[in-house]
Image (cartoon, rainbow, N blue to C red):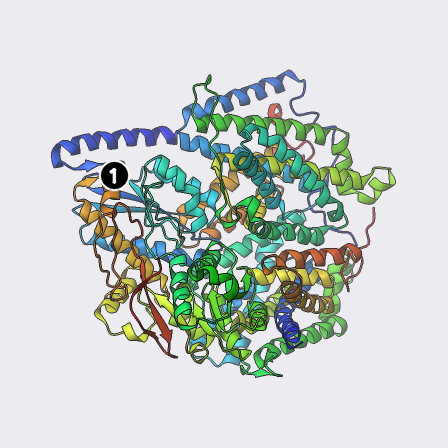
Amino acid sequence: MAGSIIAKSALAISLALTSGLALAAGQYGPGASDTEIKIGNTMPYSGPASAYGIIGKTEAAYFAMINEQGGINGRKINFISRDDGYSPPKTVEQVRQLVEQDQVLFLFSTLGTPTNVAIHTYLNDNKVPQLFVATGADQWNNPKKFPWTMGLIPSYGTEARIYAHYILKNLPSAKIAVLYQNDDFGKDYLNGLRAGLGDKAQKMIVATQSYETTDPTVDSQVVTLQGSGADVLMTAAIPKFAAQAIRKVYDIGWKPTHFLSSVSNSVGTVMKNAGYEKGVGIISAAFAKDPTDPQWANTPEYKEWLAFMKKHNPSANTADVQGVIGYSYAQTLVAVLKACGNNLTRENIMKQAASLHDLKLPMLLPGIAISTSATDFAPIKQMQPEKFDGTTWKLFGEVLSGS
Amino acid sequence: MHQFLQQIFSGLAAGAIYASVALALVMIYRATDLVNFAQGEMAMFSTYIAWTLVNAGLPFWAAFLITLAVSFVGGMAIERVLIRPVENAPVLAAVIVTIALLLIFNSTAGWLYSYTVQDFPSPFPDRPVFGALITTRDLGVIAVTLVMLAMLFIFFRFTATGLAMRAAAQNPESARLCGIPVGRMLAIGWGLAAAIGATAGIMVAPVLFLDPNMMGGVLIYAFAGALLGGITSPVGAVVGGLIVGVTENLVGTYLIASQLKLTVAFALIILVLVFKPNGLFGTAIIRRV
Amino acid sequence: MEKRHVIAPATGSPGGAGGAVFGSNSAQWISILALVVFAVALPFALSKYHVFELTMVMIYAIAVLGLNILTGYNGQISLGHGGFFAAGAYTAAILMHRYGVPYWATLPAAALICFVLGVLFGLPALRFEGPYLALVTLAMALATPQLLKYFDTWTGGQQGINLPKPVPPHWLEIDRDRWLYFVALMALLIAIRIAANILHGRTGRALIATRDQPIAAVAMGIPTARYKTIAFGTSTLFTGVAGALAAIVIGYVSPEGYSLFLSVSFLVGSAIGGIATIGGAIVGGLFIEFVPNLANDISDAAPWAIYGLAMLLFMYTMPRGAVGTVWPWIGKALMRMGPHKIE
């Protein structure tokens, strides 16, 4: 049956491995050879989070481009990306298939918090790297307990703490209202804000309202928050609801200092939809360049990214910031694989991933650098605050880290 | 007090959205005795057609009319080609076919147009009025819903096709004997429902923003509204939709934490249905042995 | 005005043609024995991953079987069985995680809780039919993730609960995946036995009468309300046990795992397998487990479109479900496990 065929090919691979060892002096874990590096991934190509599927497609497109250019140290990347529909039981299934049947060397950029939690123990028990998970939860930086798991982007909590510090410094008597999505993403912001405000949180946060992704609008929540008398609003929402919230706040004549989560600060898909004039003065933070922000339009980095998207990922919407995120994820991984040289074992992958030093990527903001160590599994820790002026985000202040 | 009024008005604005989709559900239920779970996704797909036309440079109302025509023909084609084969099969088979259509439309839209949220032009100006209680655009949606309701009422009550359709749905055998082309009536019912859905989609896209999942939540509320009003009654669909919109807002504001407002709103609707099993305006289904 | 039936009405006498599953006929015994031997030997011929997949197939089959009791034999459509699947899963998770209850002991607990929930839910639900019942059960499916997130001291909220891994008995030298396969197989066999007993006995005949001729059934003195409630409870009991098993096998529960799509999947599996059949539940389990992956292999651009097309294909070629349509052609020896009534 299928199982035995795969078992045989696994045997063939291991034979090839042994002979390869003698010839090229390469050291290989499962899924790696003289000619190939096999990488596994899960993405929500279907289901409620399908808007994030573009990350996986961009990564696949980037690896296809790398392969066209000759691969990494002569090895082609075989990127196997499977759909989990954002359902944790499905993720477990897909990841087991990737590890046990497809025999991938490691998992890369698996998307979602609950989905990654579901495979966390399995991958660590089996010593398979769960590298650069695509989620902004706080829990991935825990090398002592989970030495095989590493995040990449700044956590939602980090970002919320940046806002909290800003509020404590500049608006010490603020009354804060929070609009958040009722899931891990929204709750991480809320908890991060509370942590950042410390013992003042109880007094300063005067109202919270949540929404479900099945809600048609968040108008009612915004009205309720206004009724609380708050003068600061923090919105932790995905693009569609963020745009609705910005519009409603303006329409009902509420003028709070508005903090907007970085997942939804795209000029092209949020600020434009809400109406540019309605978003003037909103404060957010960023670590990557927004492809729709006119300030980057003439830079060589943006043009190179655009050319890549047009050529290798033509079906993707270039107004979507997730295309930049996927691009940066893939570039980080390529840097790690290059550093691995001919030692493509799971141990060395984690070792090299934990030895990144001041790595700069073209589509990250100037001043944002990627650094890791054996005790620091949070590659990007910094963000830069920015303020919307009606057409573009103006970076201000210095690069901050929220810890 | 001002906040209470604001909640009522934003509930009415949301309710009008549910009502417009609920009308399409009622249309199909009256024509074919079936709940079309793909109604929301068909409306979303129609809206993307309009979006493509507007982006190609057509004036808004021209794009609107072309989309209505395309949706009407498309709805008829779906009935003739996709629903017809399960016409005499058990209802569950037809339900599964509409669920399959839901998935196909959603996935195809994501593939063709991507999941990125798009702006959609509104035919109505966007200005807060009545002390910022509501915007002119929301009023536009409510007005269009009421116009659709009036047209449906006239259609069923006074036009020959409308009467024939009622007859075809209620008693296909006798209707056929009277010379009513029952098959064509079913197709026209689907065509009209698709056109109503397209109108709903085009009206709400500027409010909700256009993406392939735009109608997912709306369909659920519209379904609840249609049943609360009585699944056979267009007036009931509109009243039900508005009640659902307002109830949800008031529950979330005054009754319970916003995390549970959907749950509580549905519990209240079900409670009403326990006492009015055919909805507020529905007619009882007569059963015979 | 004659209402369309939710499923095909029974032709001929319901109980008469079939007799009991696992009945006394010797040819039948032999074929069943052969099937069981095959099912026991199978995991040793497959890789651990494929064994795991088959375990999930059996778990989904139990859930679909539960739905079949309701939809197929009672004529009620439920869009909310994902909620009962979640109730079973969280029963197992909370008992194992908080109270250190061994995994096998959580199954009866999940069965009991989900039966009670089903009866409580069934009482008001009984007042509804057709699209109204669909709405009530839809509300159940939508409320489930919200409630799981809200009562987070018990459910772990967003973070979910990681379950301790079940350990196979040490006298059996067998790995965890194969052991869980046998646990699921046992559960499936017991579920089939119980379902067959209910459906081919007095209760089954009463259910079918209630479904096809509700008014006549009342006139004949069948307490339809009681039978419908029992059907609801039994149905949710099965689905709840399946949920508990799934939680044990997957090792993790979180609200995202129990979305509306899960409930819809069960209904799809039920319709595609064969609504009023026991064998159809297994086909349904296979569909739920494998077709989404196949769809993704064909097109990762629009996987749900492929999944939807597969549903259409099944419904057009086999509107009464795979087993309901194909069964009459299959040899008589296996016939007793299938649809005893659609011929």
- The reply, left or right, for residue B141 in relation to residue B166 is left
Q: Residue B231: tell me if it is visible.
A: no
Kind of residue indicated by mark 1: Glu
Q: Residue at x 46, y 63 (%)?
A: A238
Structural crowding at the residue carrying mark 1, measured as other residues with C-alpha within 10 Å and reported as few (<14), some (14–19) or many (≥20): some
The spot of residue B175 in percent (x, y) is 76, 60
Q: Which residue is mark 1?
A: A347
What quarter of the picture does the N terminus of chain A occupy?
A: top left
The spot of residue C120 in percent (x, y) is 72, 43
- The reply, left or right, for residue A228 in relation to residue A88 is right
Q: How many marks?
A: 1
> Is residue C24 depicted above or below B130 in this figure?
above
Depth check, front residue: B59 or B229: B229
* Chain under callout 1: A
- The reply, left or right, for residue A386 in relation to residue C260 is left
Q: Could you say whether the residue bearing mark 1 is in a helix, strand or loop?
A: helix
The spot of residue C330 in percent (x, y) is 59, 29
- The reply, left or right, for residue A281 in relation to residue A340 is right
> Is residue A286 depicted above or below B124 in this figure?
above
Q: Residue at x 38, y 56 (%)?
A: A155
